Image (cartoon, rainbow, N blue to C red):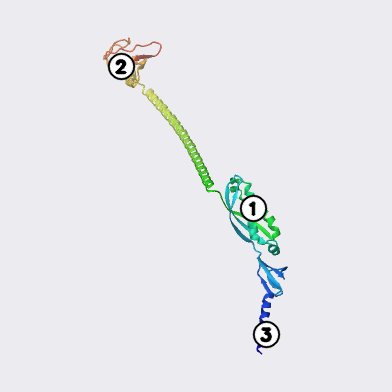
Amino acid sequence: MEPVIIVLVILVVLVFIALIKTIQVIPQASAAIVERFGRYTRTLNAGLNIVVPFIDTIRNRIDLREQVVPFPPQPVITQDNLVVNIDTVIYYQVTDARAATYEVASYIQAIEQLTVTTLRNIIGGMDLERTLTSREEINAALRGVLDEATGKWGIRVNRVELKAIEPPTSIQDSMEKQMRADRDKRAAILTAEGTRQAAILTAEGEKQSQILRAEGEAKAAALRAEGEAQAVRTVFEAIHAGDPDQKLLSYQYLQMLPKIAEGDANKLWIVPSEIGDALKGLSGAMGNFGNFGGGGSSTAGGGSVPQQHKGTGTDRRERPSID
């Protein structure tokens, strides 16, 4: 009985192993390559699949989702003979599992080497400044070459990105100095523009202030002149209403003489001709002065009476200057 039991156990184990090898479960967005006696038979898609045990074998399981592969920095020489290090990132997707398995030994390594060689060809035709400012152009050119070359491998390159472009240290220092000079220049321009605008606004404000001040002074002068005219009219009307005699007028003339002599710079007096008549009237009223009718007697102070000029209506007397 024991040999029979051993045989049954062996058969059960073989059946169990055969069932395991017969049923193949493929995850979603994956594929499996089936070979029969070393030859490609078919591609298993996602779900439950049945294969012949011990005859069919699974050669490779491939992920059909989009993959991201970063490549290490690669030294590239620009058109102006400068070495820059460029990091790249490739976004690809396997569209044909059979071609990705049999058309290329390692599609990851093949994509990396193709990226390096293509990048060197593209950057070799650009100078450093264009390389730093033309990332979109480089990405588009690199993606076009890679997508065309990897199509027969069952690979589709969806996107290529330049992660970093690092020029030499000396070039970086020169670029930093240039950027600092540009920033200082822009700051100086903005400062000068602000100063100019402030000066313009200040001048406009001063102009408006002077205009308003002049208008105010003009209005004040007009009001002042109008007031003075009104005062003269009032005085004139009051004088005529009071009917003053010759004595009062002579006294008023004498009161005006000190005002005529005011000021150190006055060297020439212009004396109205009516002063003689006023003095005559005042002397006749007081009885203390000599005869002023001839206009030529001496004064108490020893000064000479001003000589009257006929036809002019005024007497001129030279006043000695005080040095």
Q: Quadrant of the N terminus?
A: bottom right
Q: Work out whether 142 lies above or below 248.
A: below
Q: Quadrant of the C terminus?
A: top left
Q: Residues within 10 Å of mark 3 (few under 14, many from 20)?
A: few
Inspect the image, locate mark 2, and give the three-letter code of the amino acid beneath it: Leu
Q: Which mark is residue 117?
A: 1
Inspect the image, locate mark 1, and give the three-letter code of the amino acid beneath it: Thr
Q: Nearer the viewer, mark 1 or mark 2?
A: 1
Image location (x, y in percent) of residue 217? 44, 31
Q: Give the labeled residue for mark 3.
A: 7
Extreme residue toward the bottom, this view: 1
Image location (x, y in percent) of residue 204? 49, 36
Image location (x, y in percent) of residue 116? 62, 54
Image position of 225 (left or right of 106):
left
Name the element at disc 2: helix
Mark 2 or mark 3, which has the lower sequence index? 3
Q: Check if mark 2's residue and mark 3's residue have beta carbons within 8 Å.
A: no
Q: Residues within 10 Å of mark 2 (few under 14, many from 20)?
A: many
Tell me the residue at 41%/25% (across/down): 233
Mark 1 or mark 2, which has the lower sequence index? 1
Name the element at disc 1: helix
Name the element at disc 3: helix
Q: Work out whether 248 lies above or below 193.
A: above
* Residue in front for this viewpoint, 213 or 224: 213
Q: Is residue 174 visible?
A: yes
- Measure how far apart labels 1 and 2 are at the Cα level: 128 Å
Q: Work out whether 198 lies above or below 77.
A: above
Q: Give the labeled residue for mark 2.
A: 282
Image location (x, y in percent) of residue 50? 71, 74
Q: Residues within 10 Å of mark 1 (few under 14, many from 20)?
A: few
Q: Check if mark 3's residue and mark 1's residue have beta carbons within 8 Å.
A: no
